[in-house]
Amino acid sequence: MNTAEVLVKILEDASVAHIFGHPGEQILPMYKALEKSSIKHILTRHEQAAAHAADMYAHSTGNFSVCMSTASPGALNFVMAVATAYKDNNSVLVLTGDNPYSERLQDNFQSFDLPGVFENITFKNYAPSNGREAILALKEAIEIFKKEPRGPIHINLPKDILMEEGVERFIDSPINYKTDYNYNQMNLLINMINSSKKPLILGGSGIIWANACNELKEFAEKNNIPVTTTYPARGIIDEKNPINLGLVGARGSSMSNYAYLHSDLIIVLGSRLSERTTILSSKLNNFEQKVVHVNIDKSVLKGKVKINGDVYHVLKELNSIDFNLNNKKWLDEIKCNDNPLIVDGVYDRSLPLRPQSAIQTIYDNIGNSYVMGDAGSHATWTMLLANPDKYGKFSYSGALCPMGMGLPGAIGISLAHPGEKVVVINGDGGFQMCIEELATIREYNLPIIITLINNNQLGIIRQWEEAIDENFRYEVDLKNPDFLTIVKGYGIDGERVNTNGEIESAIKKAMNMDGPYFIEINTREEDIPLPNLFIPDF
C-alpha cells in the first residue's frame, strides 16, 4: 500500500463518510485511493466552497469533517474558509497536496510555503517529510479531534510522499497524545455553586464538541440554574425551554443580559468569552470575581476560578452532587425583566415587502428544518428571528462571518443530515460569491431550499456609509443579473415572489419537493436595528 491508500484506510476506520474537495495534479494519489473507498467525495466547484461545506458539516454535527485540495492554486483558495472555521473553533481536517518534498525550498511552478500559510489559521499544522510521518500526523489529528477539539488541523501532503510504497506497517503505530487538563479547582467551583443565590450558566459551542448537551440540560434543570448562550452555541438547549434565556451580549435577550449583570456567579462552559459575549462586562466592577471558567484551551481562561478541562467531565461530576439550590426567587426576578425584542415590521403585510417580514414568513413555513445564514443585512434578521430547538438547527459564522458561505454551508449541513430539509437565507451580494455551487447542489440533488433576499444592494455597507455621512452612498448598489434564469440554467427550478402570501405558497411547494428549489424574494431597502443591549437602570 502507498501512503495515500493508508491515509484513506485510516479515515475509513474513523467513520469519515464524506470528503469535500476538488482534484488537481498533486493530490491525485488521494483521489486514486478514494476511487474504491466507502468514503463519498463531494465535488464542489471551488475549493473555498469545499472548506465552507466541511466547516458547516462539522458545526452542525459536533464531529470532525474533511476537505481536500491540490497544491497552491487549490490550497490557497481554502484560506478564508479555513480561517472562518478557526475563528469558530470548528474541527475541520484540511488536506492539501503539494509538489514533491524534495522541491519544497525551490521556487518552482505552483510551489508555495503552504505550512507557513496555514500556521496562523489552524490549531495544528503538519508538514510530514515521508510516508510514516504523514500517517502518524493523520492518526494524531484524529486523536486531537476526539480529545481536544479546538479548531482545524492542516496536513500538507507532497505528491511523492503520497506515492511512497510499503508504508502499511505504520497503520497500527500507537499515538500517545495526552491532554494536560487540571481539575484541581473543582472543589472551589462546587463551593461557589453551593453559596450562590443568583447563579447563571453561560454556554458556548465547546459543549457540543464535548458531546455534553444532555449533561448541561440535566444540570440546569435539576438545579433551576438559568442558561444563556453565545452566538455559535444557540440551540444547545431548546430555546423554547424556560431555563434557556437566549443569546447573551450584543443582540442578547433582555433576560440574558439582565441575568448577566445581576448574577452573583457566572459558570462559563466551553466559551472563549469573545467581546460580543462580554460587551456588558464594563458595567460590572466585579466581573472577574464572579466568573468560573471551564475550557479545554487554558489560554482563554478568565475569572476567579479557572478550570482547564473538558466540560463533559465537569458537568458529569456536578450532576453527581445534590446542591439543593433554591433559585425560584432568582428565576422570578429574571422573568420580571423580560423585554421581548420587537423587530419592527415583522408582520407588516403591506407593499413593498420588508426583508424582516419576508424572513419571518420563511421561518413560519419551514417547520423544524435546518437553517443556514450568510453575511449581510439580512443575516441580522435571520439571527434575531431564529428559535432553534437543538444545536445545529441554526448555523452561520459568528466570528469571521464572510459573505458567500451560505450555499456551500448548506451543502455541508444537508450531507451531514440526510433526508432533512435545509433552508439557506442569502442576500443578493453574498449569493453571487459562491453561486457556482448551484451545480453541486443540483448534481447531488440536495433538498435545499435556496431563498434569496434581493434588495439590489450591499445593504449593511450602505447603512455603514450613511452612518458616516448621510450623503455617502458609494459602490453599494448592485446591477443584478436575472437570478431565476441563472438558477434554472443550473437545472434547479424556482420562482420570483413579491409578497408574503407568495413566499408562503412557494415555501410550501418547496417543502414537498425531493430536491432543491430556488425562491427569489424582492424586498425594499431597509436598515437593520443596531444592537440593543437591554442595559437596565441600577
Image: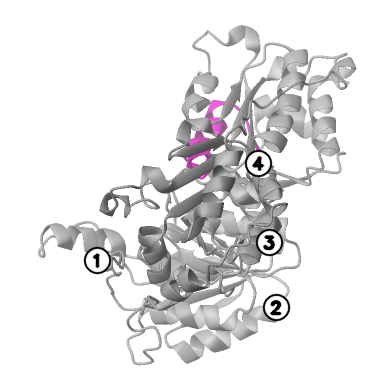
Q: Name the mark on residue 513.
A: 2
Q: Taking the image as drawn, is residue 270 in sight?
A: no
Query: Foreground mark, 4 or 1?
Result: 1
Q: Quadrant of residue 427?
A: bottom left
Q: Say which amino acid is labelled 4.
A: Gly
Q: Say which amino acid is labelled 3.
A: Glu
How much space separates mark 4 and mark 2, taking CA atoms?
A: 27 Å
How much space separates mark 4 and mark 1, taking CA atoms?
A: 54 Å
Q: Say which amino acid is labelled 2.
A: Met
How much space separates mark 1 and mark 3, taking CA atoms?
A: 33 Å
Q: Name the mark on residue 261.
A: none
Range covered by the magenta-colored residues: 66-89
**Residue occupying image coordinates x 26% and y 64%:** 477
Label 4: how many residues lie within 10 Å, few (<14), some (14-19) or many (20+)? Answer: many
Left or right for 533, reference 176: left
Closer to the N terminus: mark 3 or mark 4? 4
Image coords of residue 19 (percent x, y): 71, 43
How much space separates mark 3 and mark 4, taking CA atoms?
A: 40 Å
According to the picture, the residue beneath numbered tag 1 turns out to be 538
Query: Foreground mark, 1 or 3?
Result: 1
Say which element carries label 2. Answer: loop
Magenta: main secondary structure equals helix
Quadrant in which the C terminus is drawn: bottom left
Closer to the N terminus: mark 4 or mark 2? 4
According to the picture, the residue beneath numbered tag 4 turns out to be 21
